[in-house]
Image (tube, rainbow, N blue to C red):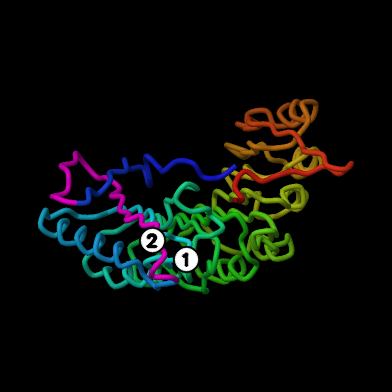
Amino acid sequence: MTVRSHVDTFADRTVVQVPEDGPLPAVDGPVAWRIDAHDWNDSTGDAVLSPGFQAAFARFLDRADEAGEAVEALVVGSWGYAAFNYAPIAQLCDAAERLPHLEALFLGDIVSEECEISWMKVGDVSPLLTAYPALEVLRVRGGEDFGFSPVRHEGLRRLEVQSGGLAPDFVRAVLDSELPALEELELWLGTPEYGGDTTVDDLTPLLAGDLFPELRRLALRNAEIADDLAEALASAPVVRRLAALDLSLGTLGDRGALALAGGQPLTHLGKLDLHHHYVSEETVTAVKAALPGVWVDLSDPQEEDEDDGEAYRYTAVSE
């Protein structure tokens, strides 16, 4: 499966598309403005920024100034053609003084028809946190040249990283960051075929419970190593202070599901999200029975493919 639809809401706000021309539409209350400039023309080749997006974003800033619109949330879609043009991180950082109220940013609301997730050229996204000290929510999506550097940010509450394959260096840089207010961490680990070589060992500092003192939701999603993660989480200290645990969109099977059900108590959780899985019906029943009072999502069961006697499982988002 691939990403097939743009977001309708982001950071508890309705998403409103910025028109190509004319003033911004009238809105009733806070919204998340969505801006894109999709261009299939590859003549610029590996340009740092798409000229079309640069112009569209500059127009948006001017119109927001004229309307006196305080931009609190921003969704960035196609930045030219994301397989050829890098994400507009520098332009977004340069605009920080004109967006002093920005609390939520989604970089990469791009569907597969526009660009496959593994092709999206992004770059190092951590400068966005340095540029926007008031940011509370950062969601980023990407694949190629997708990077992160250790950073300190006092106010970030939610960090979501969506990828078909998240490299160990990216994960380690996130874990090396100082994010004292972080309540929700979501990492789409993906598959090795798309650079997702992260292992359970790379996540050891996180699982030990020593990082991010305010963390209450941990989502290690879209992971080919879902069974290994579940076995590690069955005894991981970090789980004891969580309200929600999410291993959805991955390749979880009976081994991982039974490890969770038979490991440390999970009845303190409000939600255990395991949807898109390869768990048998018998084990689904056993897991739910072991966790009374917990909202366990085991919807969207998958079936293994078999080729030449070997079984294959697939994450929900890869290509």
Left or right: 302, with 180 as reference point: right
Residue for badge 1: 122
Residue 46 drawn above or below residue 231: below
Is 40 included in the stretch rendered in magenta? yes
Q: Amino acid at mark 1?
A: Val
- In this view, the residue farthest toward the right is 309
Q: Residue at x 64, y 54 (%)?
A: 190
* Position in image of residue 253 (x %, y %): 77, 40
Q: Secondary structure at mark 1?
A: strand
Q: Residue at x 16, y 53 (%)?
A: 69
Q: Residue at x 29, y 59 (%)?
A: 102
Left or right: 187, with 311 as reference point: left
Q: Residue at x 63, y 30 (%)?
A: 299
* Position in image of residue 108 (x %, y %): 43, 55
Is 30 included in the stretch rendered in magenta? yes
Residue 30 drawn above or below residue 190: above
Among the 4 quarters of the image, the one containing residue 174:
bottom right
Among the 4 quarters of the image, the one containing residue 118:
bottom right
Comparing 134 with 213, the one in front is 134
* Position in image of residue 50 (x %, y %): 35, 66
Residue for badge 2: 41
Give the class, few, some or many, for how many residues have Cα within 10 Å of label 1's Cα (few <14, many ≥20). many
Q: Amino acid at mark 2?
A: Asn
Left or right: 60, with 207 as reference point: left
In front of the other: label 2 or label 1? 2
Among the 4 quarters of the image, the one containing residue 104:
bottom left
* Residues drawn in magenta: 21-45
Please indicate, yes or no, whether residue 100 appears anywhere in the rendered image: no
Residue 166 drawn above or below residue 301: below
Of labels 2 and 1, earlier in sequence is 2
- Quadrant containing the N terminus is top right
Residue 18 drawn above or below residue 42: above
